[in-house]
Image (cartoon, rainbow, N blue to C red):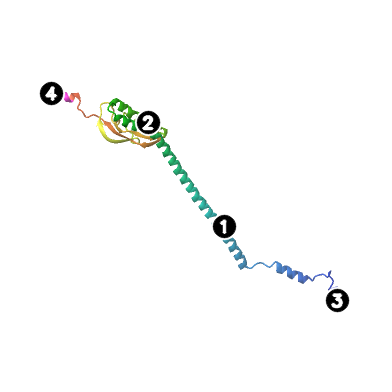
């Protein structure tokens, strides 16, 4: 009878045995194990971050190459368009040179041919937003004019553009080239009163 009761499947486990199993399952990890787990996690995060940075750096380099290529292509297209517009003006120049070699060509015809070439060039430049600006008779402005000297003037107030040696050009709203000018100054010619006094002394 005692043996059968010990081998019965419905036998109640001893309280001491169950508590010992629970204590073994809930035993905390050692500090070394926790530290190793944290190091492993940080190392993994570092690898992921490094991979992301490398990908971003590669994408940025590709972006810079694309932008540089787009800029170069845009500049090449702009130059190509300008040259294409200038070619008819060059054709007119060639025709004017050919006509000038003909003994029957008058000076007036040559002048008209040169003027036609000039109009062609200015028209081609204008299509690229390049335009000359007027300077003669205007107040001198160092932002648009480059003075190469002064000249006495009886028709202009001092500080005005008296002579234009080289026209200035604008590219849109930007200065492409300043005008090369001579600036008026007050005339130093003696007045009539001084002249008459000098004549009387003589």
Quarter of the image for residue 187 reads top left
As drawn, is 106 to the left or to the right of 194?
right
Say few, some or many: other residues with alpha carbon within 10 Å of mark 3 (under 14 / 14 to 19 / 20 or more).
few
Q: Position of residue 41 (x, y in %)?
A: 59, 61
Q: Compared to 48, does 97 lie above or below?
A: above
Say few, some or many: other residues with alpha carbon within 10 Å of mark 2 (under 14 / 14 to 19 / 20 or more).
many
Mark number displayed over residue 3: 3
Quarter of the image for residue 2 reads bottom right
Report, in whole angstroms, how far the alpha carbon at label 4 lies from the one at label 2: 61 Å
Highlighted range, magenta: 194-202
Report, in whole angstroms, how far the alpha carbon at label 3 lies from the one at label 1: 64 Å
Disc on the earlier residue, 1 or 4: 1
Disc on the earlier residue, 2 or 1: 1
Report, in whole angstroms, how far the alpha carbon at label 2 lies from the one at label 1: 63 Å
On the image, numbered disc 2 is attached to which residue?
120
Give the number of the mark in front: 4 or 2.
Answer: 2
Please say if the residues under marks 3 and 1 sit with CB atoms less than 8 Å apart: no
Quarter of the rendering occupied by the N terminus = bottom right
On the image, numbered disc 1 is attached to which residue?
48
- Magenta part, dominant SS: helix
Disc on the earlier residue, 3 or 2: 3
Question: In the displayed image of the protein, which residue is found farthest to the left?
Answer: 202
Is residue 99 covered in magenta? no
Quarter of the rendering occupied by the C terminus = top left
Q: Secondary structure at mark 1?
A: helix
Disc on the earlier residue, 3 or 1: 3
Q: Secondary structure at mark 3?
A: helix
| Residue occupying image coordinates x 60% and y 65% | 36
Mark number displayed over residue 94: none
């Amino acid at each position: 009878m005692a043996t059968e009761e010990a081998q019965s499947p419905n036998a109640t486990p001893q309280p001491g045995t169950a508590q010992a199993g629970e204590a073994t399952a809930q035993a905390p990890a050692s500090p070394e194990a926790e530290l190793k787990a944290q190091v492993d996690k940080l190392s993994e995060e570092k690898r992921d971050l490094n991979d992301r940075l490398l990908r971003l750096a590669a994408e940025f380099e590709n972006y810079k190459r694309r932008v540089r290529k787009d800029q170069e292509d845009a500049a090449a297209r702009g130059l190509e368009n300008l040259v294409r517009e200038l070619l008819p003006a060059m054709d007119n120049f060639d025709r004017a040179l050919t006509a000038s070699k003909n003994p029957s060509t008058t000076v007036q015809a040559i002048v008209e041919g040169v003027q036609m070439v000039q109009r062609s060039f200015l028209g081609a430049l204008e299509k690229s937003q390049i335009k000359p600006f007027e300077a003669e008779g205007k107040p001198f402005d160092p932002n648009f004019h480059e003075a190469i000297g002064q000249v006495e003037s009886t028709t202009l107030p001092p500080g005005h553009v008296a002579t234009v040696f080289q026209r200035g050009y604008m590219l849109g709203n930007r200065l492409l080239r300043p005008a090369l000018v001579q600036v008026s100054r007050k005339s130093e010619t003696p007045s009539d009163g001084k002249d008459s006094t000098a004549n009387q002394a003589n």
